[in-house]
Amino acid sequence: LGLRLGRGAWRNRWLGIAVTWLICLAGWIGVMTLPPKYESSAQLYVAADPVLTPLLEGIAINGNTREEFSLLQRTLLSDPNLSTLLDKTGLGLQAEGPGAREAMIRGLRSRIDIVPQTDNLFTIHYESVSPKKAYEVVQGLVNIYVERASVRNQGDIDNARTFLNSQITYFHTQLKQLEQKRANFQAKYL
């Protein structure tokens, strides 16, 4: 049986080679017609200050990673930020009318992936047919996050400063009252 199959394959070898070449050509043509996809990604590290976090717990934004991740997604994928991103990258020039612009914002939002890697590390992914546009979109998102984080961090610093100044004033007042009580005690019992 094996000898008969071997002889049949040898006799039809040219047909097998021709079929193999046709399959290869069809595959190569299929691959060549696929549009190119370029992916750009960036990692954001959200640092929580280990010294001030316990001190300011309940006063400023806590270093809760779920809150940070939710804030990151809401900030980056909000309509105003994506509209600004469309303008900065030049993608908004293709929109003809407000309906088309809203559709572009929705499409952009659906193609952006924000994935938490660790507690403080997040990755932003974006795919495009243009490597320049993929890079510009991710870089624009990073810039938006850095701007928002610096504003928020300044607010946290101001809240911490106000809290610490109020605590200093409170304890200074307490110290003066205790010193007065001590002076009264010494004057009364000496």
Image (cartoon, helix red, strand yellow):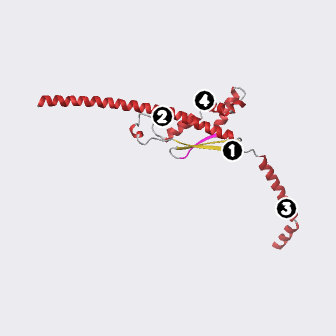
Labels 3 and 1: the sequence-earlier one:
3
Report crowding for label 4: few under 14, some 14 to 19, many 20 or more residues within 10 A (C-alpha).
Answer: few
Q: Which amino acid, by three-letter code, is at mark 3?
A: Ile
Q: Are marks 2 and 3 in contact (CB under 8 Å)?
A: no
Residue 41 seen anywhere in this rendered image of the structure: yes
Label 3 to label 1, Cα distance in Å?
36 Å
Q: Which amino acid, by three-letter code, is at mark 1?
A: Tyr
Residue 79, percent across and down? Answer: 61, 30
Residue linked to disc 2: 153
- In which image quadrant can residue 86 be found? top right
Residue 31, percent across and down? Answer: 77, 50
Residue 137, percent across and down? Answer: 64, 37
- In which image quadrant can residue 131 be found? top right
Residue 66, percent across and down? Answer: 50, 40
25 vs 173, left or right, is: right
Residue linked to disc 3: 17
Q: Closer to the camera: disc 2 or disc 3? A: 2
Q: Are marks 3 and 4 in contact (CB under 8 Å)?
A: no
Residue found 69% across the figure and 27% down from its top? 99
Residue linked to disc 1: 38
Report crowding for label 2: few under 14, some 14 to 19, many 20 or more residues within 10 A (C-alpha).
Answer: some
Labels 1 and 4: the sequence-earlier one:
1
